[in-house]
Amino acid sequence: MTSNLYIGLMSGTSMDGVDAVLVDFSDDNIKLLASHTEALPSHLLSGLQRLCQSGNDEVNRVGTLDRSVGKLFAQAVNNLIDKAGVDKSQVRAIGSHGQTVRHMPNLEMGFTLQIGDPNTIAALTGIDVIADFRRKDIALGGQGAPLVPAFHQQLFAQAGSKRMILNIGGISNVTYLPGDASAVIGFDNGPGNTLMDAWIKQVKGEPYDKAGAWAATGCSDKDLLKQMLSHSYFSLSAPKSTGRELFNQAWMEQQTADFGYLKEVDIQSTLLDVTCHAIANDCLTLTDSAQMYVCGGGAFNDELLKRLRHLLPHYKIETSSALGINPQWVEGIAFAWLAMRYQKGLPGNLPAVTGASREAILGGLFPAA
């Protein structure tokens, strides 16, 4: 097969939909051909959210949801292919990240778990699937995350230019591309959109604060901000990764328990500042100035970008659109890229980022045949 078409599938911590992209890797170029987002049905979303917390009958629930998410991912692929107007036989493989339901790399026996049965995806699409990208890195002593810095390096690095690639999903992660022979640095900053989304859903019944418009009308509370930023995660040195196992609604409620006198909008503003200050503090430990390109859902939060520009006055902050890629699709493209790397027998991790003992080919093959 001479085709270099791959599909990437991504559903992140925010659980706001399955992103599917069709990518052409011909001639060492990366060209996005088509994109599609498949919404998560409300019953599936609520099931996944419950599964992210410890509870009863977890084995049965994870088994059922594993198949259900696999079917949804397959549906995303089939709808993407219909939209793109290509024949399935032209697609070499699907790179599926899966849906993370636990990420616990720092236990004595660390692990990470993504569901979305790749066998189901392969059976329902007729296309080979590459999946389970994170667990090899953990087996080698790494965090299993973030994995996107290797892709950021290939796609965005430019000699002589200090670049920061900031991905803000439910969790925020940053990649520092120093522009010289120095090693790429990358790690999870902490909460991205997850706390803000949880709060606005709790008090207003809305899934997210569009463009940060509600937070923009509030006044952050410096005492609450200081308390939340005092969490030990923010002072950890890299490699480090986190997820909703730590930064979740229960933690948020515990942190805000003594601040019931605050207006709801002021808490929203403070939660936005937690995200912004965590990012800015980390970036300033790496370099005083850089070109920053933001991707992920947070790239569409105008108030977030405004506050980042205030905290990082010597950074030029734009979205990844300035580099020719819509912020919504960067992570999906990254997992198409990881599938391509697997098929070519090339490593997909950066040990300096994840802490793994060596580079490794990530993922496993789940053939359609």
Image (cartoon, rainbow, N blue to C red):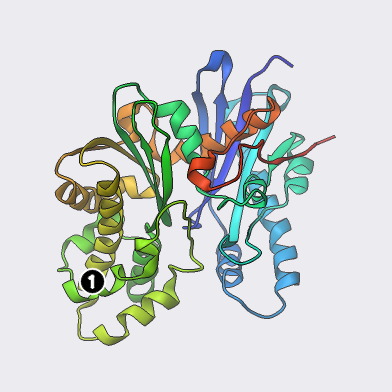
Picture quarter with the N terminus? top right
Q: Nearer the viewer, residue 4 or 345?
A: 345
Residue kind at label 1, given as amino acid type: Lys
Q: Nearer the viewer, residue 316 or 359?
A: 359
| Image spot of residue 345 (x, y percent) | 69, 27
Res. 50 image quadrant: bottom right
Q: Is residue 221 left or right of residue 199?
A: left
Q: Is residue 263 left or right of residue 145?
A: left
Query: Residue at the location (30% across, 70% down)?
Result: 230
Q: Is residue 221 visible?
A: no
Query: Residue at the location (33% across, 79% down)?
Result: 255
Question: Which residue is labeled 1 in the image?
Answer: 226
SS class of the residue under badge 1? Answer: helix
Query: Residue at the location (80% across, 36% down)?
Result: 368
Q: Is residue 347 left or right of residue 233?
A: right
| Image spot of residue 173 (x, y percent) | 41, 49
Q: Is residue 136 left or right of residue 275?
A: right
| Image spot of residue 43 (x, y percent) | 59, 66
- In the image, is residue 160 above or below residue 363? above
Picture quarter with the C terminus? top right
